[in-house]
Image (tube, helix red, strand yellow):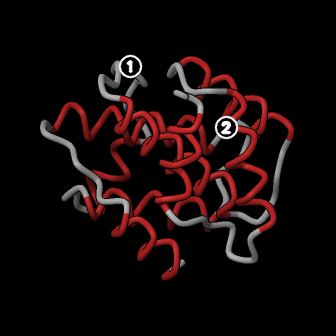
């Protein structure tokens, strides 16, 4: 879990408003439970993100009871960051469920991200022993699709 935390620091979470932060976390909570359960490692991962965003433990628990109202992420960089956070969350419990894979593709396409880049990044993460890839690889992969 510490490795994931350092990876997140390198891919710094930049959010302006509390509403954006809540939207980010409720999106992640909804994604974490797409397979029907929330694993302890997924909860730890969500807690790390929430703490990085300045939420207390009590506020984190309250977010599990907030209705998920997804906010439109405006910049491509922010959409890529959110995709990577969701992918890290997906790999955090060490199990890959078909529902999670389908959902992350659906989310990525809904965010107007390239399906080819999504596939390439998820494959690289799956092949990595830590399930992490360098943020520059992620950005380069999405940028390749623009050419």
- The residue lying at 40 percent from left, 65 percent from top is 8
- Neighbour tally class for label 2: few under 14, some 14-19, many 20 plus, Cα within 10 Å: many
The quarter holding residue 39 reads: bottom right
The quarter holding residue 7 reads: bottom left
Is 116 located above or below residue 139 in the figure? Answer: above
- The residue lying at 42 percent from left, 45 percent from top is 81
Secondary structure type for disc 2 = helix
Q: Gap between marks 2 and 1, in whole Å?
A: 24 Å
Drawn side of residue 135 relative to residue 116, left or right:
left
Q: Which residue is mark 1?
A: 69
The quarter in which the C terminus is drawn is: top right
In percent of width and height, residue 66 lies at 37, 31
Is 25 located above or below residue 46 in the figure? Answer: above
Drawn side of residue 44 relative to residue 72, left or right:
right
In percent of width and height, residue 6 lies at 41, 76
In percent of width and height, residue 41 lies at 61, 67
What's the mark number on residue 118? Answer: 2
The quarter holding residue 107 reads: top right
Query: Disc 2 vs disc 1: Cβ atoms closer than 8 Å?
Result: no
- The residue lying at 29 percent from left, 53 percent from top is 13
Q: Residue furthest front?
A: 147
Q: Residue furthest bottom?
A: 2
């Amino acid at each position: 879990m510490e490795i994931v935390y350092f990876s997140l620091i390198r891919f710094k979470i930049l959010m302006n408003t509390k509403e954006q932060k809540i939207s980010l976390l409720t999106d992640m909570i909804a994604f974490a439970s797409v397979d029907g359960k929330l694993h302890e490692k997924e909860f730890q991962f969500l807690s790390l993100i929430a703490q990085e965003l300045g939420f207390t433990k009590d506020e984190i628990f309250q977010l599990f009871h907030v209705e998920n109202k997804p906010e439109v992420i405006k910049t491509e960089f922010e959409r890529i960051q959110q995709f990577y956070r969701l992918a890290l969350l997906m790999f955090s419990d060490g199990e890959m469920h078909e529902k999670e894979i389908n959902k992350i593709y659906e989310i990525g396409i809904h965010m107007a991200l390239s399906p080819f880049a999504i596939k390439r990044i998820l494959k690289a993460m799956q092949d990595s022993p830590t399930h992490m890839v360098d943020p520059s690889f992620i950005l380069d992969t999405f940028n390749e699709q623009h050419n």
